[in-house]
Image: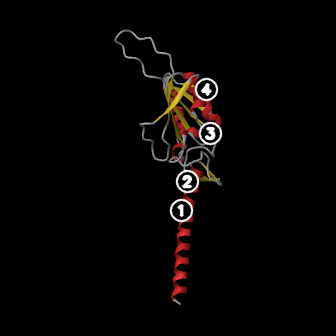
Amino acid sequence: MRSLLSTCLVVAVIAALASGACGDDEPKKKQVERGAGEASAGFYGVDPSVFRCDAILPPSAVGSAIGGEVVTMDSMFTPPKGTPAPCDFRQINVPPPVVQDGAPAPALPMWSIRFDCRESYMSSTEKEMKRLIAEEGALEVTVGKWGVEHRDAALVFVDDNAPCTVRIVGPGSAERQAIGRLVADVLTPKTAPMTPRPM
């Protein structure tokens, strides 16, 4: 009787351990799916906390857009809640600049791409865009649904497919717009960095 009881106890322990191990696999599987750059089945949006810039902005594509070579940078900017960390890039292999004696060498060109796909923000986007275009030096451009070059320092545009506003900060109007069109071409409701929403 003791032998039978011991055997049953061992079987029960093994079954419990096996069940626990299987239970641990499920969250890992979900994490991989969420971090793969596309929304889970039946949802729109990639959780901003697991959004990866290279899912829609691989450095090779950004380099092609600006006509050079770039590497990713760790962002020092803390994003607002519900938005992802910015996608920051620095150009490399740039010919050394000509500087006068004693003058500091200019920093290498850098671009920062910030996404805001919050529902609360999108409701005020039209008002914000009208405010930007009314400012001196602003220029409306054809990027996404509606784009504005702001003070020759930033491009802000509303995507024509995903419910997102994108801000690109960095040198060169042509470079900013090239990056903007790259984003607009690949950003979709499935790849947008936003709190997942049911389809």
Amino acid residing under circle 1: Asp
Q: Earlier in the sequence, mark 4 or mark 3?
A: 4
Amino acid residing under circle 4: Ser
| Disc 1 crowd, CA 10 A, few/some/many (<14, 14-19, 20+) | few
Q: Residue lying furthest left in this view? A: 102
Q: Earlier in the sequence, mark 3 or mark 1?
A: 1
Q: Earlier in the sequence, mark 1 or mark 2?
A: 1
Which residue is depicted at the point 57% across and 22% down?
Answer: 174
Residue 192 position within the rendered picture, expressed as x and y whole percent measured from the top left: 59, 43
Q: Nearer the viewer, mark 1 or mark 2?
A: 1
Question: Pointer 2 and pointer 4: residues touching (CB < 8 Å)?
Answer: no
Q: Nearer the viewer, mark 4 or mark 1?
A: 1
Q: CA distance from mark 3 to mark 1?
A: 32 Å
Q: CA distance from mark 2 to mark 4?
A: 31 Å
In the structure shown, which secondary structural element does the residue marked by tag 1 occupy? helix
| Disc 4 crowd, CA 10 A, few/some/many (<14, 14-19, 20+) | some
Picture disc at residue 187: 3
Q: Nearer the viewer, mark 3 or mark 2?
A: 2
Q: Is residue 35 above or below residue 179?
A: below
In the structure shown, which secondary structural element does the residue marked by tag 3 occupy? loop
Which residue is depicted at the point 54% across and 81% down?
Answer: 7
Picture disc at residue 64: 4
Q: CA distance from mark 4 to mark 1?
A: 42 Å
